[in-house]
Amino acid sequence: MNFPSDYLAFLEIHDGFNKYIDAGVIKTRDMARVYHQFQEFLSKKLDDTQMMVHPPSIIPFYECAELNCCQCFYADWYTGEEIGNLFFSEKVIDQNDLGQGVTFPTFSKWLVSYLEEA
């Protein structure tokens, strides 16, 4: 997967950070490990009838306090030339909900929203 250009530009300044008790933006050196843990979690916790998206296409880049809650790139959702991202939790994810709620068309839009949160 090619990561979004705005995410790659961000990594030139910061390679991981957090606020509050969240684990935060995942450091590049930890991405593969976190991705594999996340995929293992998905395979154990959710069956195919619960997943409305293709699990390998969900790539976490921001961890909440626990791995079962994170912001992820969704490699099957392109918004123009960038990969969109969505909030993952153990709730069922429906493709019809993409673009609503806690989804963002770009990493930059997610980052602005994240930084503006109280």
Image (cartoon, rainbow, N blue to C red):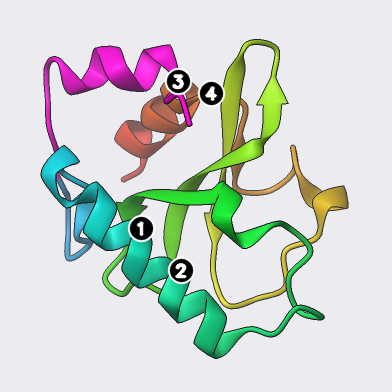
Residue type pointed to by label 3? Pro
Seen from the viewer's position, the closer of residues 58 and 20 is 58
| Residue wearing tag 1 | 35
| Side (left or right) of 82 relative to 17 | right
Q: Which mark is residue 61?
A: none
Magenta-colored span: 1-17
Dot 1 alpha-carbon crowd within 10 angstroms: few under 14, some 14 to 19, many 20 or more: some
**Mark whose residue sits in front, 4 or 3:** 3
Q: Are marks 3 and 2 in contact (CB under 8 Å)?
A: no
**Mark whose residue sits in front, 3 or 1:** 1
Q: Which mark is residue 106?
A: 4
**Mark whose residue sits in front, 4 or 1:** 1
Q: Earlier in the sequence, mark 4 or mark 1?
A: 1
Q: Are marks 4 and 3 in contact (CB under 8 Å)?
A: yes
| Side (left or right) of 64 relative to 97 | left
Q: Which mark is residue 4?
A: 3
Residue type pointed to by label 1? Tyr
105 to 94, vertically: above or below: above
| Residue wearing tag 2 | 39
